[in-house]
């Protein structure tokens, strides 16, 4: 019989500053050796549930708990935050909020130092943990100098270095490129395969997590547990659509073809889903009924880079000989592995840095002499980490700040701010303090603060990171409307779904160079580009390959075209 590790009984929690409980009637038992995925839309209570497990509730987020929560047989209320840290290791979705060391090595070693582990033993354990998360080469670097993915791996190493029984991962894939995310899930799976480890993962990217073994999926909705099912049972139900969670793309493709999804069909993974003659026949009929993807016409250039080099040090270039062209009204994605130079490229365009060689042109004019303020009249930039952008106390104040600087006031200011907040799903939080928001909500605040300015070119660094599917769709549909109105949108992203669904064109960077510039379907079906840039072949491609239906590349193109038509209705 499995040993209960975490037990919620009639549990509830209400934050001190809120009028209603965030969690209600939680009855849930997690067992030793299990890997459990917790999903749900933003505001569903899944992060609060995690905070109750690791002690951030009530030690950091005060409030009132009701019912019972036992961790390894002990009431959570009776344990100190230190005692809870001995039982639960946590990787937060915001890595910057978890760093304590001046170097990566110091950060990973922090827990060992608190336990007075001898230095000789500590060095070996830190090196082993760093190697496991592919951060060994950065041990002497400052955590704050790292890319988003490297930061996430550093925090993961800090958890792995200590032998705790419960491992809690809060959005572990949020800042990782697709292949590194895949490796992270494989690493989590290896950890979870040990019978003495209980792994809890909170993540929006359902398909990516299902790359590894998941025993159960708990669906949260409006502060309650809506379902507790196996992956196959959940994918065969309508719960994902009802609760606003994205289903895996191969499931979408099967549904488009008229296939019925059942647990017996083993739908939990693209490699396990059963493709009998009936399923293959439906996929073939759907494929043959679809038109080929249309090739878009070339547009007048709004932004151009000509042979740009850049390096923070003269002898170490981050970008090398990068030339690219963005057309007026295009929606372009820029993708590539962590550290490839994607964010650096956007900072050059905005004027935060200046190229060592080459030119950056806006509508044919060299911007070399323009200040950051002058460029901001045409180019809006939303950074990857919202904490690096926010300067005001409330949601309204932060969103209105840029307009106030430009002299907008009165009813016009209020109307434009409210409109942006509604689109970003934040209107009901307009008077909230920023400090009370989740990482994903902060991200939406920063996007709203730029959207309200109506720039000609909008650059978004990981716009959907930490967003649930409903807010993802609202945000991207709003960006699509802006794009249709003539605004050029550039998205730096690890989200292959976003790239497939919305981008007209994809530019791929690897090791500081541009290695590809093509339609999304062509990028995701080119094995060399996928491997070099740490991307991941879409599961739709794998579905077509396994089923032997048509040319897999063309199957992906037709899927993308059909999916866009469906969403446009």
Image: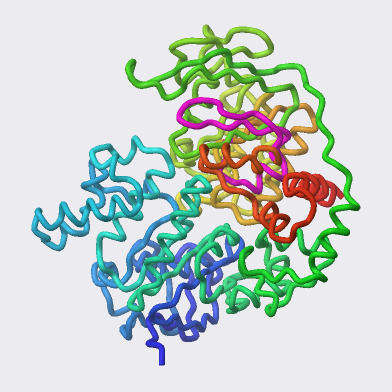
Q: Is residue 2 above or below residue 137?
A: below
Give the quadrant of residue 317: top left
Name the one closer to the observer, 159 or 10.
159
Asked if one can make out residue 427 in the rendered structure from this viewpoint, the answer is no
Which residue is situated farthest in the right direction here?
A: 289
Count the numbered circles shown.
0
| Residue drawn at the location 32% of the way across and 54% of the way down | 132
- Residue 19 is at least partly visible in this image: yes
Task: Report the front residue among 160 and 386.
Answer: 160
Query: Looking at this view, is 488 or 393 the one in front?
Result: 488
Horizontally, residue 359 falls left or right of residue 56, namely right
Residue in the picture at 54% in, 21% down: 350
Q: Is residue 501 magenta?
A: yes
Which residue is drawn at the image coordinates 80% and 70% (left, top)? 277
Residue 57 versus residue 87: which sits nearer the camera?
87
Residue 213 is situated, as x and y percent measured from the top left of the image, at 50, 69
Residue 334 pos. (x, y %): 59, 33
Colour scheme in the image?
Answer: rainbow
**Up-down relation of residue 288 to residue 532 (above or below):** below
Q: Dividing the image into 4 quarters, which one contains the N terminus? A: bottom left
- Please state the horizontal and vertical placement of residue 542, each as a whole percent of the image: 66, 55
Rendered position, 367 above or below 98: above
Image position of 451 (left or right of 432)? right
Residue 50, given in percent of the width and then of the height, sits at: 44, 67
Kindly identify the residue that appears in the image at 32 percent across and 17 percent down. 315
Quadrant for residue 257, please give it.
bottom right
Q: State the extent of the magenta-drawn residues as a range.
A: 492-520
Relative side of 34 to 417, left or right: left
Q: Is residue 512 magenta?
A: yes
13 is higher (above) or lower (below) than 447:
below
């Amino acid at each position: 019989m499995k040993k209960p590790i975490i037990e919620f009984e009639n549990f509830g929690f209400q934050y001190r500053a809120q009028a209603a409980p965030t969690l209600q009637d939680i009855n849930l038992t997690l067992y030793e050796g299990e890997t459990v995925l917790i999903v749900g839309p933003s505001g569903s209570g899944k992060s609060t549930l995690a905070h109750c497990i690791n002690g951030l509730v009530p030690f950091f987020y005060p409030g009132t708990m009701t019912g019972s929560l036992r961790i390894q047989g002990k009431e959570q209320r009776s344990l100190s935050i230190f005692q809870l840290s001995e039982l639960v290791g946590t990787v937060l979705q915001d890595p910057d909020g978890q760093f304590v060391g001046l170097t990566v090595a110091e950060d990973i070693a922090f827990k060992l130092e608190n336990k007075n582990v001898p230095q000789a033993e500590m060095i070996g354990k830190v090196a082993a943990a760093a190697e496991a998360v592919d951060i060994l080469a950065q041990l002497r670097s400052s955590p704050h100098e790292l890319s988003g993915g490297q930061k996430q791996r550093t925090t993961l190493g800090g958890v792995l270095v200590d032998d705790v029984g419960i491992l809690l991962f809060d959005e572990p894939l949020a800042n990782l490129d697709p292949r590194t995310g895949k490796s992270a899930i494989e690493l989590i799976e290896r950890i979870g395969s040990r019978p003495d480890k209980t792994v809890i993962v909170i993540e929006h990217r359902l398909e990516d997590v299902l790359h590894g073994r998941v025993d159960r999926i708990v669906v949260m909705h409006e502060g309650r547990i809506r379902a507790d099912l196996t992956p196959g049972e959940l994918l065969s139900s309508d719960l994902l659509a009802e609760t606003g969670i994205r289903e895996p793309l191969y499931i979408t493709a099967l549904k488009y073809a008229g296939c019925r999804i059942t647990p017996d069909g083993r739908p939990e993974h693209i490699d396990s889903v059963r493709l009998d003659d009936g399923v293959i026949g439906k996929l073939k009929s759907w494929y043959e009924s679809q038109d080929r993807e249309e090739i878009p016409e070339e547009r007048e250039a709004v932004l151009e880079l000509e042979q740009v080099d850049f390096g923070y040090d003269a002898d170490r270039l981050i970008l090398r000989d990068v030339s690219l062209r963005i057309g007026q009204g295009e929606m372009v994605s820029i993708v590539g592995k962590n550290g490839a130079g994607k964010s650096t490229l956007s900072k050059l365009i905005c004027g935060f840095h200046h190229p060592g060689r080459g030119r950056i042109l806006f509508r044919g004019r060299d911007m070399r002499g323009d200040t950051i303020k002058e460029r901001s009249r045409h180019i809006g930039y939303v950074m990857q980490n919202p904490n690096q952008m926010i300067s005001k106390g409330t949601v309204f104040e932060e969103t209105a700040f840029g307009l106030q600087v430009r002299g907008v006031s009165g009813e016009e200011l209020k109307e434009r701010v409210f409109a942006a907040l509604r689109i970003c799903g934040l209107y009901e939080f307009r008077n909230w303090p920023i400090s009370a928001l989740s990482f994903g909500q902060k991200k939406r605040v920063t996007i709203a603060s730029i959207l309200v300015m109506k720039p000609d070119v909008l650059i978004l660094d990981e716009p959907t990171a930490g967003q649930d599917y409903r807010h993802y769709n609202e945000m991207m549909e709003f960006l699509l409307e802006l794009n249709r109105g003539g605004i050029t949108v550039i998205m730096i992203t690890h989200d292959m779904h976003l790239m497939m669904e919305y981008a007209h064109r994809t530019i791929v960077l690897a090791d500081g160079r541009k290695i590809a510039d093509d339609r999304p379907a062509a990028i995701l079906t080119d094995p060399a580009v996928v491997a070099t840039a740490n991307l991941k072949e879409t599961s739709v491609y794998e579905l077509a390959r396994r089923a032997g239906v048509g040319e897999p590349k063309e199957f992906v193109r037709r899927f993308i075209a059909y999916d866009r038509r469906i969403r446009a209705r």
